Image (cartoon, grey):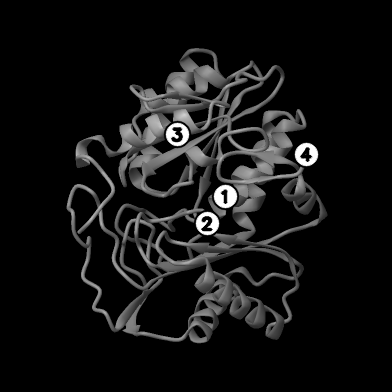
Amino acid sequence: MKMLINVPETVVADALRGMAAAHPELTVDVENRVIVRRDAPVAGKVALVSGGGSGHEPLHGGFVGPGMLDAACPGEVFTSPVPDQMLRAATATDSGAGVLFIVKNYTGDVLNFNMAAELAEDEDIQVATVLVNDDVAVTDSLFTAGRRGTGATLFIEKIAGALADEGAPLDRVEAVARQVNDSSRSFGVALTSVTTPAKGGPAFDLPAGELELGIGIHGEPGRERRAMMTSREIADFAVDAVLEDLQPNGPVLALVNGTGATPLLELYGFSAEVQRVLAERKVPVARTLVGNYVTSLDMAGCSVTLCQADEELLRLWDAPVRTPGLRWGA
């Protein structure tokens, strides 16, 4: 497999050095693996900290900045960051208003963020934690006990980040983050396997004429494997799986996400099919975001995330954001 790297052992460090050079508005600690907005800590503001294994960029480091995260902790590829990273992030960003940990539901992430929260509280930093578990494909899978955390992470980081920027207290920011998680569901599809730098080849076997329905962002198995389907057929399957579980009774935010190697031409075409299914099911779409946001290295595929959104969530979604991976407004 051809990869634009030096050696597998330095992939994350090399990427962090490049990020530091490209984004002077961030403070990137390459050695300790922490990415912090340069103006942190912001006086009177609840700090948002997230993180996880590398390989899902721009999640999470690409979402550090005004309107989203205050810090992110990148682990090795598909490997949880360690508690020391999370503690450094909390210490660097806490202004006295508290810190919200946003944690995708993977066993290593959960254990390490919980340990970091205990360490932070020992240093008189108030910490609240929100678990992201939006994937409807499977209940238990590799890396997880319960549902996996996927695309809803972006919705939570954006909406809770906007509220924190307004100066809301920790309990309210935590409540909104939980509301977004409870109102969101996701479903992913893989057209090819993922290639990890350490292995240098496909992480799992997926024949050319088949796809995996319900795949996880680390290549974990999904619901079933089928012969290749059309974009229309995939949209029908994925959206119906989400709606069956979510059962929205109002407008939704829609994320049509690429897993890393899917061209935008295909993603926009797939988004049109998602919109068709939602219209046929009489689900109004308030906002749509299309692109590569929660990726899996070079996997070809996509995911659909829907979040039932009231007027307050839509207002916070529309609020300005300035990060490397998401940017709009003032």
Q: Residues within 10 Å of mark 2 (few under 14, many from 20)?
A: many
What is the C-alpha distance between the residues marked 3 and 2? Answer: 23 Å
Q: Is residue 167 left or right of residue 133?
A: right
Front residue of 22/195: it is 22
- Residue 16 at x, y percent in the picture: 39, 32
The quadrant the N terminus occupies is: bottom left
For label 4, the residue is 330
For label 2, the residue is 151
Which residue occupies 56% across, 21% down? 93
Badge 1 element:
helix
Contact (Cβ within 8 Å) of mark 2 with mark 1:
yes
What is the C-alpha distance between the residues marked 1 and 4? Answer: 20 Å
What is the number of the mark on residue 154?
1
First reached walking from the N terminus: tag 4 or tag 2: 2
Which residue occupies 73% across, 81% down? 282
What is the C-alpha distance between the residues marked 3 and 1? Answer: 20 Å
Q: Is residue 194 left or right of residue 179?
A: left
